[in-house]
Image (cartoon, grey):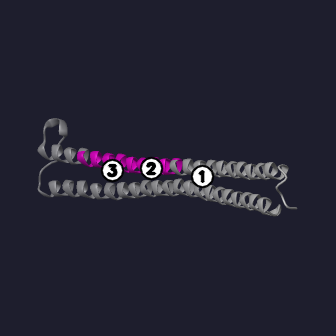
Amino acid sequence: MPVFIPIALAVISAISAFSSSRSQRRAARAQRAAAEEQRRIAELNAVRVEQETEEKIRRLGGQFGQEEALARARAAASGFKIGQESTGDSIALSLAAQQRENARQLGWESSAGASRASIIRRGGDVEQMVGLERARQMRQESTVSLIKAGTSAARIGQSFYNWSSAGDVDT
């Protein structure tokens, strides 16, 4: 058997393993970039939710203010004098209850929006963490693949050396 065949096989094996390892490393870099992009997108979505919540609270606040003003105007137009809540006046009590409920609703909207944004951010953090871990595994697999290929090439070389030292080689 010609000498160059085992050597050529070892070289081809090493080149193939090196190429595979490079491809795995490129894939790991792409996975890492995708994980970071997922986190960036989650942050943008969280900011959007916060902005939408602020706008919703602003609009509800305006609407509630108009409703309260309308209730005062109706009470005044009816001829009833709007008294103090502390005196037990039913109109004053009703207006105060409406104001408290409106404030509770605005507070709830605010905390619900903050909660949605927080959930989106945590989801982005988890997606990034999973993606980065996958990238780390891909990089590790690349290194293992390269080591295995080197070991395989070394074994082929050793086998050839052993075979050639036995004197069975045509040169």
Percent position (x, y) of residue 112?
Answer: 34, 48
Which residue corresponds to mark 1? 138
Q: Amino acid at mark 2?
A: Gly
Task: Judge the density around disc 2: few (<14), some (14-19), many (≥20) Cα neighbours within 10 Å.
Answer: some
Any magenta on residue 171? Answer: no
Residue corresponding to mark 3: 109
Q: Secondary structure at mark 3?
A: helix
First reached walking from the N terminus: tag 3 or tag 1: 3
Camera-nearest residue between 114 and 60: 114
In the image, residue 165 above or below residue 18? above
| Three-letter code, disc 3 | Glu
Q: Taking 31 as reference, is 47 left or right?
A: left
Determine whether, in the image, residue 83 is placed left or right of residue 41.
left
Q: Which residues are magenta?
A: 101-129
Of residues 25 and 90, the one nearer the viewer is 25
The residue carrying mark 2 is 123
Instruction: Please give the count of numbered marks on the rendered protein.
Output: 3
Secondary-structure class at tag 1 = helix
Kindly give the residue lying farthest to the top in the view shown: 86
Q: Going from the N terminus, do you reach mark 1 or mark 2 first?
A: 2
How far apart in space, not on screen, are marks 2 and 3 (Cα)?
Answer: 21 Å
Mark nearest the camera among 2 and 3 is 2
Could you tell me how far apart the alpha carbons at marks 3 and 1 are, in whole angstroms?
A: 43 Å
- Residues at marks 2 and 3 touching, judged by CB atoms closer than 8 Å: no
